[in-house]
Image (tube, helix red, strand yellow):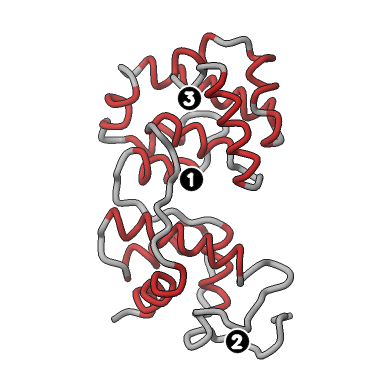
């Protein structure tokens, strides 16, 4: 078993299945991936609820709604003007490519997403994995922090992504679950400034494990 799969098994046994991404439709998941940039998920849920109440969770409804009104609906997520513009651009791209299903089936999905202004690798990969069912491992700040502390591995987004894709079986469901588990660990134990090492399920593997609640 590779160290990464050992990590996966420990997290799964400790936290249980995360059933992520929480969304009723694939387009809702795509919207959530944009709204969650730089904000807590609870704020995203509030914004998603606002959009649902307005009947505004389809590409056409987001494209047609007044931008100022869309901004108000997603205001809880912060950077709402930029995110509203990104949602508009995403919706237009989806509509121009035959709708959600056809858009997500295209061979160059990741490249198509990255061509949309405001969508970076993490958001593109989240959409490709969770909405498009593509075998792409999503890397976020939690993931980069955990592998640096636990394994001493450090690098760019692409480096860390390759690290996981080369040491984890190419399995879409494992990729989804693993990413969600790393987020859970990052939130509950391996935080940026005040990590809680006592009781952390990664302790037997972690190179920087310390008995106190703070690594640094």
Q: CA distance from mark 2 to mark 1?
A: 30 Å
In terms of depth relative to the viewer, which is nearer, 20 or 103?
A: 20
Left of 185 or right of it: where is 81?
Answer: right
What residue sits right under mark 3 in the picture?
A: 90
Instruction: Name the disc covering residue 209, or none.
Output: 2
The residues tagged by marks 3 and 2 sit, at their Cα atoms, a distance apart of 42 Å
Where does the image place residue 195, in percent across and percent down from the top left?
A: 67, 74
Instruction: Examine the image and state in which quarter residue 45 appears.
Output: top right
Residue 6 drawn at (x, y percent):
37, 79
Q: Residue at x 61, y 71 (%)?
A: 190
Label 1's element?
A: helix
Categorize mark 2 by other alpha carbons within 10 Å: few (<14), some (14-19), many (20+).
some
The residue most toward the front is: 53
> Which mark is first along the chain, 1 or 3?
3
What residue is at 31 percent from the left and 31 percent from the top? 104
86 over 211 or under it: above or below: above
Which residue is depicted at the point 73% across and 72% down? Answer: 194
> Which of 26/83 is in front?
26
| Kind of element beneath mark 3 | helix
Q: Answer above or below: position of 21 versus 12.
A: above
Rounded to the nearest angstrom, the CA distance separating label 3 from label 1 is 15 Å
The answer to whether the residues at label 3 and label 1 have Cβ atoms under 8 Å apart is no
Quadrant containing the C terminus is bottom right
* Dot 1 crowding, Cα within 10 Å, few <14, some 14–19, many 20+: some
Which one is earlier in the sequence, the residue at label 3 or at label 2? Answer: 3
From what the image shows, is residue 171 above or below residue 112? below
Q: Which residue is mark 1?
A: 121
Q: Quadrant of residue 29?
A: top left
């Amino acid at each position: 078993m590779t160290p990464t799969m050992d990590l996966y098994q420990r997290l799964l046994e400790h936290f249980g299945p995360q059933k992520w991404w929480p969304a009723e439709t694939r387009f809702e998941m795509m919207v959530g991936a944009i709204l969650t940039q730089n904000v807590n998920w609870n704020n995203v849920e509030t914004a998603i609820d606002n959009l649902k109440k307005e009947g505004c969770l389809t590409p056409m409804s987001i494209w047609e709604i007044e931008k100022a009104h869309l901004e108000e609906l997603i205001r809880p997520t912060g950077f709402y003007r930029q995110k509203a513009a990104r949602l508009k651009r995403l919706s237009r791209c989806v509509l121009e490519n035959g709708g959600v299903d056809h858009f997500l089936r295209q061979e160059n999905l990741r490249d198509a997403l990255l061509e949309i202004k405001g969508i970076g690798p993490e958001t593109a990969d989240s959409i490709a994995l969770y909405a498009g069912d593509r075998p792409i491992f999503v890397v976020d700040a939690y993931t980069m922090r955990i592998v640096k502390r636990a394994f001493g591995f450090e690098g760019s987004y692409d480096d860390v992504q390759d690290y996981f894709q080369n040491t984890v079986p190419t399995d879409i469901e494992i990729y989804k679950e693993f990413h969600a588990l790393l987020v859970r660990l990052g939130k509950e134990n391996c935080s940026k400034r005040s990590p809680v090492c006592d009781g952390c399920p990664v302790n037997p593997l972690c190179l920087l494990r310390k008995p106190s609640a703070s690594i640094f």
